[in-house]
Amino acid sequence: MKGIYLVTDQNACQGKSLESIVIDAVKAGISCVQLREKNIGTRMFLKKALDLVSILKPEKIPLIINDRVDIALAVKADGVHLGQSDMPYEHARRLMGPKAVIGLSVETWEDVQKAQDLEVDYLGVSPVFPTPTKTDTKAPWGLEGLVRIRDYSRHHLVAIGGLDASNAQDVIKSGADSIAVVSAICSAKDVFNATTKLVSFFEKTQFQKEKRS
């Protein structure tokens, strides 16, 4: 799991359709999309998931469904992202199968330690910085916390929470394999340019990291 990872939020879309934002982000080089819509019913969630499958599948870009294993199975999504209060990893893996992408949010050091024995595909380090889009989380990790997790964990790390073009490079340098953003893309006036900038930052910083190593 590497690159810029878009997490959706229709409320942050400034009147634009979620589908149009995803299309522009795909054109700009997004690596993954997570459908996370907390305030809609199951039928609408299912419809949006199907709409995103039709956009992302031809481009071979993974669609990850937040929380809802049932929706992921129904639309044959690439995987699910689980929070600490969602379905336990072992049950999700049994239902989704060995090839599904399963991510797990870690909000405390205990979460990180417990995840070390799980065959999750990535850890969602949440939140790195304070953010209005994630109000039910623990204290922010900060860059020092992210470095600590990178030094300890065997998993890919997806950083999320308060990330945008102003801090993406520092977060990548601190150990994130992927940058997950919400408002930085969903609320952008020009989604294509905003995404292009983030993708460019990621690629340049990742190249520098690999060159140094």
Image (spheres, rainbow, N blue to C red):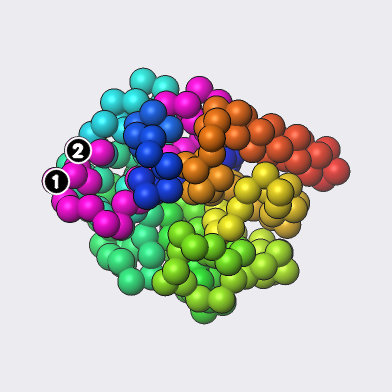
Residue occupying image coordinates x 72% and y 69%: 144
Residue 36 in the image, given as x and y percentages of width and height: 35, 51
State which quarter of the image contains the C terminus: top right
Q: Nearer the viewer, residue 11 or 157?
A: 11
Work out whether residue 80 can be spotted: no
Q: Which residue is mark 1?
A: 43
Residue 137, percent from left and from top:
46, 72
Q: Could you tell me how far apart the alpha carbons at marks 2 and 1 are, in whole angstroms?
A: 6 Å
Task: Check disc 2 and report the residue beneath it.
Answer: 47
Tags 2 and 1 touching, CB below 8 Å: yes
In the foreground, 41 or 88: 41
Classify 73 as above or below 56. Answer: below
Q: Which mark is residue 109?
A: none
Residue beneath the point at 42% across and 22% down: 59
Residue 93: image quadrant is bottom left
Using residue 48 as the reference point, say whether residue 13 is left or right of it. right
Judged left or right of residue 116, residue 202 is: right
Q: Which residues are magenta?
A: 23-48
Given the current orientation, which residue lies at the most extreme front position? 15
Q: Is residue 39 shown in magenta? A: yes
Going by the image, does 69 lie left or right of 208?
left
The front one of 118 and 3 is 3
